[in-house]
Image (spheres, helix red, strand yellow):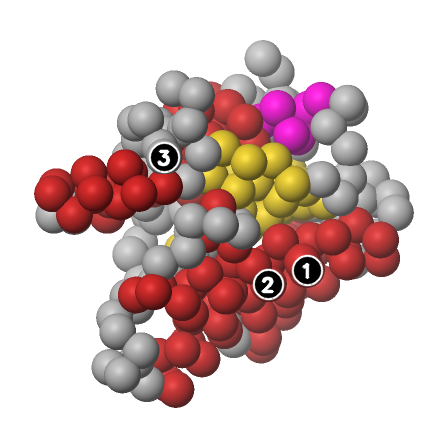
Amino acid sequence: MDLSGLVILVTGASKGIGRALTKTLYNYGATVIGVYNKTNINEIYDTYRCDISKEEEIKELFNYINKKYNKLDVLVNSAAISMDNDIYDKSKKEFMKVLEVNLVGTFLMCKYASLLMNKGVIVNISSTNATDTYNILSMDYDASKAGVTNLSKNLANRFPSIKVVTLEPNWVNTESVLEMDKEYLMKELKRVGQKKLLTKEEVVNKIIEIIIKDEIVSGIVIRMDGSNE
């Protein structure tokens, strides 16, 4: 596969799906900008620190991309946080922080990316929790991901020349998931009907399919729930 000539921006690039994706895209020849916040990335491709909950930092990021590359072909919004706890322990500050990063940050990234795109692609990583695998401990995360799915549909209508696709994976074998209590994780998989953890590679391959395949059209939601694995 040859992705040379494509300038691709990935948020949440310091770990998990984002880290795996940036490495794969770079190996396929793409010009990659990996965005991180707290954990620095030591890679040979381009990296940039940006807190996507802060609009001024996002503006600076896209000014940098415009000056250095003069275009953007693909944006993958992978950055997300969760602060799981019971409703009576969950503060407004925590709830708003999850929304600011997961939903508002995604909105702002799409807004400013669109200014550098001609016929670009935006892939927004949501979750099956946006639809039907929600958990009472993660209601702020679930609400944010439902917002991302809805936001993507609106963006697809607003930007007809840009392909905007939502990807909704279920549990993935990221570092944070593998560090969870195994008994709790097995109960969750059983509860939502997931046969096994999705691999990062499966999700990365699906994102690349979205980028390169014309038959995957703007506005659709692609679900990866592991129910058939």
Residue for badge 2: 147
Query: Does 86 appear in magenta?
Result: no
Where's residue 21, x and y in %? 45, 34
Residue at figure coordinates x 77%, y 39% from the top left: 218
Q: Which mark is residue 214?
A: none
Gap between marks 1 and 2 measured at Cα: 6 Å
Residue 86, compared with residue 168, is above or below; it is below
Above or below, comparing residue 118 to residue 134 in the picture: above
Helix, strand or loop at mark 3: loop
Residue 7 image position (x, y, % from top left): 64, 38
Label 2 near label 1: C-beta < 8 Å? yes
In whole angstroms, how far apart are the C-alphas of marks 1 and 3? 27 Å
Question: Can residue 34 be seen in this snapshot?
Answer: no
Q: Look at discs 3 and 2 and give the one toward the viewer.
A: 3
Which residue is the site of mark 3? Answer: 193
The residue under the point 26% across, 45% down is 188
Residue 212 magenta-highlighted: yes
Image position of 94 (left or right of 130): left
> Mark 2 falls on what kind of element?
helix
Q: Amino acid at mark 2?
A: Gly
Q: How dense is the environment of label 3, judged by Cα within 10 Å: few (below 14), some, or many (20 and up)? A: some
Does 98 sit left or right of 214 as displayed? left
How far across and how far down the image is residue 184, in percent? 16, 47
Of residue 90 and residue 49, the one placed in the foreground of this image is 90
How busy is the neighbourhood of tag 2: few (under 14 within 10 Å), some, or many (20 plus)? Answer: some
Q: Which mark is residue 151?
A: 1
Q: Main secondary structure of the magenta part?
A: helix
Part of the protein shown in magenta:
208-213
Snapshot quadrant of residue 192: top left
Seen as rendered, the residue at the extreme bottom is 92
Which quadrant is home to the C terminus? top left
Type of the residue with mark 3: Gly
